[in-house]
Amino acid sequence: MRIRTVLLAATVAAVTGTTTSAAAQETIRLRIASGHPPVNTYANLMQNFFGPEVTKRVAARTKHKVEFVHGYGGAMVKVADTLEGVQAGIIDIGGFCFCFEPSNLPLHAFQVMLPFGTMDPVTSLKVARAVYDKVPYMSKVFEDKFRQKLIALIADNGYNLGTTMEWNNVSDLKGVKLAGAGLNLKWLEFAGAVPVQGSLVEAYQGLQTGVYNGWIMFPSGYVNFKLYEKGKYYTEIGFGAITWHGLTINSARWSKLPKEVQDIILEVAKEYEALTGTVNKESYPKQVAELKAKGAIVRTLPDKVRQDWAQSLAAWPAQMAKDLDGKGLPGSQVLDIALQAAEANGHKWPVRYKMK
């Protein structure tokens, strides 16, 4: 049903989103969208950096003109439909989390499979880039299976744990209902908590009504959705900054773009990718300070607690690698590269995961 709807909408989009030509100047219209609102760093940068910079540079350096039609917060595509939206041509360029595509892109959440990684989003990008540069499958799958080209990776801020109650040891969380999204629910399960699949849209109500008693969340989400009002304890446990979003462009649309426009898009996309790391890194301490100012109790637990939690997950990465290898995917290779790349960039794992 969802695919049928997507394809029908694509037919409409093809009529309304065509390229207009003129003798002196060609106007290229590109629909760019994300299911997330522009309060999210990466969506904000799509709207306020990527689009404007491409438009400006194309106008300055070519005979062409690019106009972007922006759609965020579900205006054009929902968070879980962006991959298909780009694939079908509903939108030309989409930004989305690979976490919403566990069947289509199971390997692309590899940093989640290595919990307690770096909390620095700039370093997280470097680790992810090491993987993508060494494993062609990671980029090629978008073109081979989903008719789109991956033009940028997107870093997230570091994940911590917000709760309605104070806790001091991993054992304090046994049997406690905690929310997460996708694979990071495993972080909770292995620690003895009760994992509950959640979404930011209903997070405030879920905490208010007791559907769960906490959330795995980076500070910006905790601030922007006012979760501190219902779960005032925000603990910097340091699960890691995860690079598991991407920016893609429809392959058919890409092939029709002039070469000089393609080059500018890739140039800006590279800068956009870097900005998702630096902006998130700069924002993190400001968001933590804002949480404190709004009455949240922000704490950092001893390294021993972090190590205890990591120890509960010690066997999980190898298990995930084996499962992915069994599906014909380079799971062990990807996780090995990521482990080593993190260490090469100065990260010390609380527990050194082994693939065998």
Image: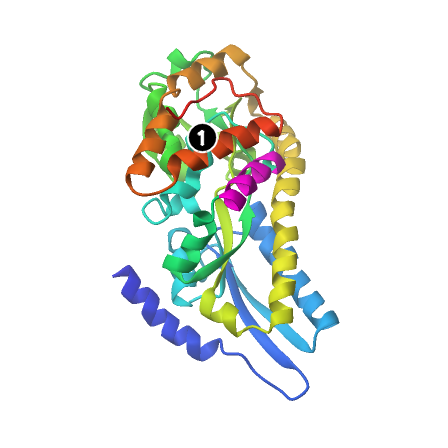
Q: Horizontal and vertical percent for residue 213?
A: 38, 25
Q: Horizontal and vertical percent for residue 279?
A: 65, 42
Q: Is residue 10 shown in magenta? A: no
Q: Is residue 127 shown in magenta? A: yes
- The quarter of the rendered structure image containing the C terminus is top left
Q: Which residue in the structure is indicated by mark 1?
A: 216
What colour scheme does the image use?
rainbow
Residue 97 visible in this rendered orientation of the protein: no
Residue at 65% from the left image edge and 58% from the top image edge: 267
Q: Horizontal and vertical percent for residue 35?
A: 45, 54
Q: Quadrant of residue 219?
A: top right
Q: In this rendered view, identify the residue nearer to me: 24 or 263.
A: 263
Q: Quadrant of residue 172?
A: top left
Q: Horizontal and vertical percent for residue 217?
A: 48, 33
* Side of 205 relative to 342 (left or right): left
Q: Neighbour class for label 1 at 10 Å: few (<14), some, many (≥20)? A: many
> Which residue appears farthest toward the bottom when viewing the image?
23
Residue at 44% from the left image edge and 13% from the top image edge: 308
Residue 193, placed above or below residue 198: above
- The quarter of the rendered structure image containing the N terminus is bottom left
Prevailing SS of the magenta stretch: helix
Residue at 39% from the left image edge and 75% from the top image edge: 12
Residue at 57% from the left image edge and 48% from the top image edge: 42
> Which residue appears farthest toward the left when viewing the image?
1
Q: In this rendered view, identify the residue nearer to me: 249 or 50.
A: 249
Secondary structure under tag 1 reads strand
Q: In this rendered view, identify the residue nearer to me: 175 or 336.
A: 336
Highlighted range, magenta: 122-134
**Total marks in image:** 1
User: What residue type is disc 1 on?
Assistant: Ile
Residue 158 visible in this rendered orientation of the protein: yes
